[in-house]
Image: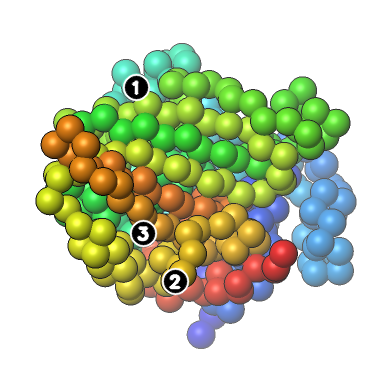
Amino acid sequence: MAKLRAAVIGGSGYGGGEMIRRLLHHPHVELVRVSSIDHVGEPLSAVHLTLEGETQLTFEGLPPAEAAKDVDVVMLGLPHKVSATVMRELMATGARIVDMSGDFRLRDVRSYEEYYGGKHPCPEELEKGTFVYGLPELNRDAIKKARYVASPGCFATTVELALLPLAKAGLLEGEVEVVGITGSSGSGIAPSAGTHHPVRASNLRTYKPLEHQHLPEILETLAHAGAKSLALDFVPVSAPLPRGIFATCFAHVQKDTTPAALTKLYAETYAKEPFVRVPHGRLPEVVAVSGSNHAEVGVQIGVEHGGARLVVAFAALDNLIKGGAGQAIQSMNLMLGLDERESLEDPGGYP
């Protein structure tokens, strides 16, 4: 059986590098082309050092339609607000598309304009729902039928996986508060004051509190899953680690909800999911999932207070893999009729 052909557009960033690495070792997909506006003509290993000797491909400075020529699927690693400017051109090629930017995750055009800034180049594609939201744990069947997938954001994936069992069971309602801690690679490959090692390595600081761009994405997704009248207060925190996200989510459930019922709910929700696990005897940890496409979730419940009980849901994942390129590959596999686990089953390193 001939391999399916893939191209990566925007391959010089951290997310692009992770996609390239996984595609190079995919048993049923051949990576035939990597385009970028940076490092044109240079080998991929000039940027992604672990690819030394792995491939003869170089970064090509191609227009999007030419980069997508004669391939089955295009994997986009372009920045927010750039991806949307080339999307019509890419869609005209007939290739399937998985987009890692935030440009097509939302249905509400006004939310996009508020949280990403500026007008959307093709708002009708948001309103029509042209892109399926690429969270397999919620939208697996739709992804299988999709030609275009918007891969979720890293914070959004973490929070959604933490709260999805509650939403699906109709238990998620009202105000939810979330603190999400993230590693420096989430800020991208270009250095900045926020990712400069002498500051980052010994610091914790918040950024975009209560206004992070993943907030409306989380609200839309959890409402689609069954949450009711949901309000979300989200505070992101920058942490001194290169990879990983850890989310702590505070919600309230009816006072007669028991710890045993919640434990069973989480275990049953993720029992058949290949990349989400509920660890036994401990709560989620970043080190347990770093370098892999796995996520961990856990839940604790407090005593009754004021007619309700506090639930604290936790989730941990690697922001570049399950929160980024790995999840994009997972959706690609589903779109192409392949086993969604292909090239993603490695457990990562420890510690």
Q: Residue at x 82, y 49 (%)?
A: 47
Residue 169 location (% of width, % of height): 17, 54
Checking the image for residue 284, the label placed there is none
Residue 315 location (% of width, % of height): 46, 52
Residue 48 location (% of width, % of height): 79, 53
Q: Which residue is mark 3?
A: 136
User: Would residue 202 be found to the left or right of residue 236 on screen?
Assistant: right
Looking at numbered disc 3 in the image, what kind of residue is underneath it?
Pro
In the image, 171 versus 335, the foreground residue is: 171
Q: Is residue 69 visible?
A: no
- Distance between mark 2 and mark 1 Cα atoms: 39 Å
Upstream in sequence: badge 2 or badge 3? 3
User: Would residue 20 be found to the left or right of residue 115 on screen?
Assistant: right
Looking at numbered disc 2 in the image, what kind of residue is underneath it?
His
Q: Which residue is mark 2?
A: 280
Which quarter of the figure has residue 339? bottom left
Asked which secondary structure carries label 3, the reply is helix
Asked which secondary structure carries label 2, the reply is loop
- All told, the count of numbered labels is 3
Upstream in sequence: badge 3 or badge 1? 1
Q: Nearer the viewer, mark 2 or mark 1?
A: 2
Q: Which residue is mark 1?
A: 111
Upstream in sequence: badge 2 or badge 1? 1
- Distance between mark 2 and mark 3 Cα atoms: 23 Å
